Image: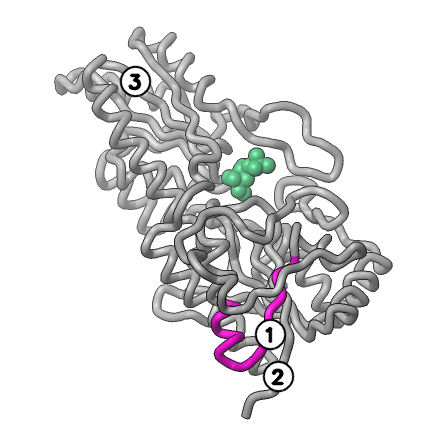
Amino acid sequence: MSTSKKIGIVTGGGDCPGLNAVIRAVAKAATMRGWETLGILGGYDGLLEPRQFRVLDYRALDGLLTRGGSILGTANRGQFSAKTGHGESRRLPKELLDRTKAGMDALGLSALAVIGGDGTLSIAQQMDEHGIEIVGVPKTIDNDLEGTLLTFGFDSAVACATDALDRLHTTAESHNRVMVLEVMGRYAGWIALYSGIAGGADAILIPEVPFSYDRVCAKIAEREAKGKRFTIVVVAEGARERDGGFVTTGPAEANREAHLGGIGAVVAAELARRSGKEARCCVLGHLQRGGTPTNFDRVLCSMFGSYAVELIATGRLGQMVAYSGRQIGAVPLAEAVGRLKTVDLDGSMAQTARALGISLGD
Ligand code: F6P
């Protein structure tokens, strides 16, 4: 039995590879059920007047599986931004939630599929509490959302960072240098740890393990003693020295999280000073968020998007699709937001790094 519906898709927060692949999967799965899909432009704001949307019919989906960014645009600032600090979010005013609901009614939407990270999904949770029919899809290169083993975009960011490490290896070796690669990830070290292992790093500094320069220099010295004249260090943007603070690009704007960045250069300078070796820093930045998704992410996005439609069809609202490692399922939005999934130091990834002799700086 198929009851016809019209659903809206919203992308919110920072972009990442695979957003368009999820949009495609949601719209295709909806079309298969005979439903209509509207893509809301510019995040949740597109639901408010002047409403901005585009019809996602079959032809509109051409080429989306591989295309980076979001064809709907996305926003991580403005009246719908919820993140105000490290893991903190704010409540939206009731009046704004009322206007959002009115916007959906005006567009004839019965439900929303919202694709976003912690901030966007914590807004989705508030909308669910307000009676808006909504489901979430976990997006972020940082992989820091609770309730799912993986978020989409993470694998693509790791692939980008690993490729950078492969390139840095050859130049580090030619010049006998210490090369430091700063990667993103906010307050979680997943990108640093996965890419560091995949790219053969000698030291990986992550927010979960405050580091000591002495320990990293000991790693450099150990390698020198074995005739290895170069060292590769991966630094997560949220890494910090023991007893030190986060390195940021400046003071946080009102109602926004502090912008992390700059720790790579600090680490490179200090390692050069202490070890007497030449050190250089490379900041990968938004390259990790751009471009086409990896094969793995394309599959994950396809599974996530089609399952989001399944959730709406079966009335399982207020849920976020989730990947458990075996299959796609769902968890309540409330269980996914408001706390960060950070690297478990007793887990396989951290243990693998230690078993391989990679220094975590402690
Ligand atoms: O959350 C994704 C992310 O890329 C983080 O890794 C990074 O700290 C932040 O967004 C950068 O945000 P912006 O695009 O605003 O510079």
- Viewer-closest of 210 and 186: 186
Indicate whether 280 appears above or below 85: above
Q: Is the residue at mark 2 in contact range of ligand 1, meaning its CB lies under 8 Å from it? A: no
> In the rendered structure, which disc, 3 or 2, sits on the residue that comes first in sequence?
2
Please name the residue shown 45% across and 58% down the image.
21
For the residue carrying disc 1, how many other residues have a C-alpha within 10 Å: few (<14), some (14-19), or many (20+)?
Answer: some
> In the rendered structure, which disc, 2 or 1, sits on the residue that comes first in sequence?
2
As drawn, the residue found furthest toward the right would be 95
State yes or no: residue 39 in magenta.
yes
Highlighted range, magenta? 26-40
Residue picked out by circle 1: 36
Q: Check if mark 2's residue and mark 1's residue have beta carbons within 8 Å.
A: yes
- Viewer-closest of 5 and 233: 5
| Residue 137 on image: x %, y % | 53, 62
Indicate whether 314 appears above or below 300: below
Please name the residue shown 53% across and 70% down the image.
308
Please name the residue shown 51% across and 23% down the image.
262
The type of residue carrying mark 1 is Glu
Image quarter hosting the C terminus: top left
- Looking at the image, residue 195 sits to the left or right of residue 55; the answer is left
Mark seen at residue 4: 2
SS class, disc 2 = loop
The reply to whether residue 181 is visible in this rendering is yes
SS class, disc 1 = strand
The reply to whether residue 333 is visible in this rendering is no
Indicate whether 31 appears above or below 184: below
| Residue 113 on image: x %, y % | 60, 66
Mark seen at residue 178: 3
- Looking at the image, residue 106 sits to the left or right of residue 3; the answer is right
Structural distance between the alpha carbons of marks 2 and 1: 8 Å
Q: Nearer the viewer, mark 3 or mark 2?
A: 2
